[in-house]
Image (cartoon, rainbow, N blue to C red):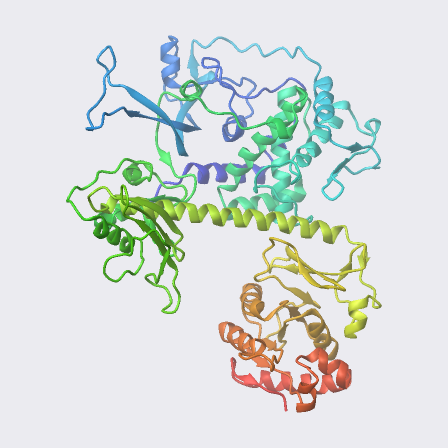
């Protein structure tokens, strides 16, 4: 059995990884001013961009011309025998379909030809073609280069001025973009070896400047701290973009090999080969914005251009090789055709109850199930109540008998839902043309219905489910984008904080604990970062005199603050997890053991699972709050559930009846009521006993 053929982006990523290891990636190689030019097609006039720009420039040829096989033949040229082509990719944004009358018959024009209509595809299709370099074409005129009729320094200066970016020349030997200040910081121009090097550096930092959340539309750019994958990924975006712009304006280019980032770039591409595609696409957008500055066009005025039929036809190569799924693409597969679709590469998404084509898979054989395809309908006559009942059941709603169609909202249970929850809703109308509305909150399906005298076909229902899955995917994407923006704000607050929290900070003083990795803002409020297992800040807890706040829109689930370093190498060293910061601080000061702050009881289990990724062999001890005044005691019940999920143990405070009457619930309360020494005795004895017991057994200190 032959090995599965690698996708274009996998092969391209492997080529770039090999180039990076050798130090020969296009943006790693220096050139003299005017020596290289962007690759282009001399017959169609197309200047290749994005992935094609990088791919065709890899070989570093001085002649930047490329043509297709058919173009060469049409011009009376010939491709040399044995020549190997290079792939280029392009997006198809429109599709043509035959125009039909109400009976489904074709409509002809005055010349008797089938009329066509062009419409914009909901999801553009990635297509491929082959091109040959000018040196592979017999009869191709000699390349004499392109005269640079402009002053590269003047063009570069125009780009910088037109951007409106704040640039200060107050550095000795550093050049960087400050995200917090939204400012480019450079050494004075006369400190650079040449004007070309100054402008190449300035354009690189301007590339970063375009990515600030105030200007960039999209979630593909993040600014993490130095040394993180986010930082290296953004450096890759800016490096490719400034390389492209330098080539465009004719600057000499020698930015060096960026040894500090190369390993991170390689790791990112090995983990996700599609990352190089995203980087090239992002770099192309950055380049477009930067070249727009030269013409006085601000980023907020640079809107995406509509792709017309003529534009697509002009860019379309002569030969289409395949159609790949750029992302996870949902399919409208009827139940009766599921086995056929599965053999052709479709996968089942159990959560969204829909078939899909995985990212990078060939859609050619699956195109019949794309949701934008036309579906045939069956025509057995049915009463509208029966037809609506079938539509409701197909959507997963549980309906006894015929639905109530009185124009009022009805709530019902759904398949796979809880017995006591009504996650389905519908409204039906019988006046005029019978119609209705259907919603399944569990699957995310939401659709309108109209009676047409026949039942929904399996194809139509599959289409509804596929579209519902797409909408859910879009909602998930919006949520992730909002969380990414919130994480950026939280990180900026942390970086811009007034300083580390002093021990007389009001909240710390009130709770009788010290500052363990916390800061204060300009108002003196306590800042506690919530991180994931990689150390990246996801959210920020701010404790003010009025209460505790979290960053709006941020992902709190699984976020924690770790007090003291934990290596995870010693299986006898437990990792303690508590709810609030003050409780965790008291526990640490009493035991000198590392403690993770989960922020609340509902986050104990997500935090435990997040920490389990980093420390799979660690013994987990959940130091619970005793919410004895609440009916279900969430402090204890949530700690037990978290312990069960990772094989941990639970330790809870042993409170006297008098202490309970005072409202004491946690170990910080014991710290303040009995003193630190008493807390040490209780906790250390409890933890020692816990570690000697079977995992997941609850332990109450004696």
The residue nearer to you, when weighing 255 against 237, is 237
Instruction: Classify 140 as above or below 183.
Output: above
User: Where in the figure is residue 460, as x and y percent of width and height?
Assistant: 27, 44
Instruction: Classify 390 as above or below 75.
Output: below
The residue nearer to you, when weighing 244 against 442, is 442
Instruction: Classify 348 as above or below 648.
Output: above
User: Where in the figure is residue 281, as x and y percent of width and height?
Assistant: 53, 33
Marks counted in the figure total 0
User: Where in the figure is residue 462, as x and y percent of width and height?
Assistant: 29, 47
Residue drawn 53% across and 19% down?
Answer: 64
Q: Answer yes or no: is residue 246 visible.
A: no
Q: Answer yes or no: is residue 654 visible.
A: yes
The residue nearer to you, when weighing 416 against 692, is 416
The residue nearer to you, when weighing 117 against 616, is 117
Left or right for 491, reference 81: right
Residue drawn 25% across and 38% down?
Answer: 375
Q: Quadrant of residue 539?
A: bottom right
User: Where in the figure is residue 372, as x and y percent of width and height?
Assistant: 33, 36
Instruction: Classify 94 as above or below 271.
Output: above
> Looking at the rendering, in which quadrant would you find the C terminus?
bottom right
């Amino acid at each position: 059995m032959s090995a599965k053929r690698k996708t274009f982006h996998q092969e391209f990523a492997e080529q770039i990884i090999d180039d990076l290891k050798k130090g020969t990636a296009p943006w790693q190689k220096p050139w003299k001013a005017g020596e290289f030019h962007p690759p282009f097609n001399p017959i169609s006039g197309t200047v290749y961009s994005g992935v094609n720009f990088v791919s065709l420039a890899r070989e570093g040829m001085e002649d930047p011309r490329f043509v297709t096989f058919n173009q060469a033949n049409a011009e009376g040229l010939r491709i040399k025998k044995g020549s190997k082509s290079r792939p280029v990719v392009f997006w198809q944004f429109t599709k043509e379909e035959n125009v039909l009358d109400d009976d489904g018959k074709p409509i002809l024009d005055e010349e008797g030809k089938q009329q066509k209509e062009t419409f914009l595809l909901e999801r553009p299709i990635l297509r491929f073609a082959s091109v040959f370099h000018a040196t592979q074409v017999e009869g191709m005129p000699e390349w004499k280069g392109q005269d640079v009729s402009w002053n590269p320094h003047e063009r570069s200066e125009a780009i910088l001025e037109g951007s409106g970016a704040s640039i200060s020349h107050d550095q000795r030997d550093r050049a960087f973009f400050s995200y917090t200040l939204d400012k480019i910081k450079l050494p004075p121009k006369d400190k650079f070896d040449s004007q070309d090097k100054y402008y190449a550096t300035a354009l690189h930092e301007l590339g970063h400047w375009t990515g600030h959340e105030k200007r960039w539309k999209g979630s593909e750019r993040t600014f993490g701290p130095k040394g993180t994958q986010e930082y290296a990924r953004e450096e890759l975006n800016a490096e490719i973009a400034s390389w492209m712009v330098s080539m465009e304006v004719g600057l000499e280019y020698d930015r060096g090999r960026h040894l500090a980032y190369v390993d991170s770039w390689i790791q990112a591409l090995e983990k996700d080969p599609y990352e190089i595609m995203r980087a090239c696409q992002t770099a192309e957008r950055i380049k477009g914005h930067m070249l727009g500055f030269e013409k006085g066009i601000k980023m907020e005025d640079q809107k995406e251009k509509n792709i017309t039929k003529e534009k697509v036809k002009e860019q379309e190569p002569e030969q289409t090789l395949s159609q790949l799924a750029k992302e996870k693409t949902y399919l409208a597969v009827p139940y009766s055709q599921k086995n056929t679709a599965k053999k052709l590469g479709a996968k089942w998404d159990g959560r969204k109850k829909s078939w899909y084509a995985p990212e990078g898979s060939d859609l050619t054989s699956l195109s019949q199930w794309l949701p934008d395809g036309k579906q045939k309908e069956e025509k057995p006559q049915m009463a509208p109540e029966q037809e609506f009942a079938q539509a409701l059941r197909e959507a997963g709603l549980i309906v006894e008998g015929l639905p109530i169609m009185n124009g009022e909202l009805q709530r019902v249970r759904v398949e796979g839902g809880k017995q006591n929850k009504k996650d389905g809703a519908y409204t039906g109308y019988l006046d005029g043309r019978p119609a209705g509305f259907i919603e399944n909150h569990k699957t995310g399906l939401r659709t309108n219905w109209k009676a047409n005298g026949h039942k929904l076909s399996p194809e139509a229902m599959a289409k509804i489910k596929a579209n519902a899955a797409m909408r859910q995917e879009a909602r998930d994407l919006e949520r992730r984008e909002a969380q990414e923006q919130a994480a950026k704000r939280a990180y900026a607050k942390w970086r811009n904080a007034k300083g580390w929290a002093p021990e007389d900070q009001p909240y710390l003083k009130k709770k009788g604990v010290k500052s363990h990795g916390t800061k204060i803002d300009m108002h003196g409020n306590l800042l506690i970062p919530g991180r994931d297992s990689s150390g990246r800040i996801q959210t920020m807890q701010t404790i003010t005199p009025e209460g505790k706040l979290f960053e709006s829109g941020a992902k709190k689930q699984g976020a924690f603050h770790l007090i003291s370093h934990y290596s995870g190498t010693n299986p006898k060293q437990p990792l303690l997890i508590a709810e609030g910061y003050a409780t965790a601080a008291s526990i640490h000061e009493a035991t000198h053991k590392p403690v993770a702050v989960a922020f609340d009881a509902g986050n104990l289990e997500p935090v435990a699972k997040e920490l389990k990724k980093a420390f799979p062999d660690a013994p987990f001890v959940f130091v619970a709050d005793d919410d004895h005044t609440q009916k279900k005691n969430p402090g204890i019940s949530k700690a037990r559930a978290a312990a069960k999920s990772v094989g941990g143990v639970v330790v809870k405070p042993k409170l006297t009846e008098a202490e309970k009457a005072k409202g004491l619930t946690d170990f910080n309360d014991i710290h303040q009521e009995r003193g630190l020494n008493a807390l040490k005795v209780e906790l250390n004895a409890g933890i020692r006993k816990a570690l000697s017991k079977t995992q997941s057994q609850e332990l109450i200190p004696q």
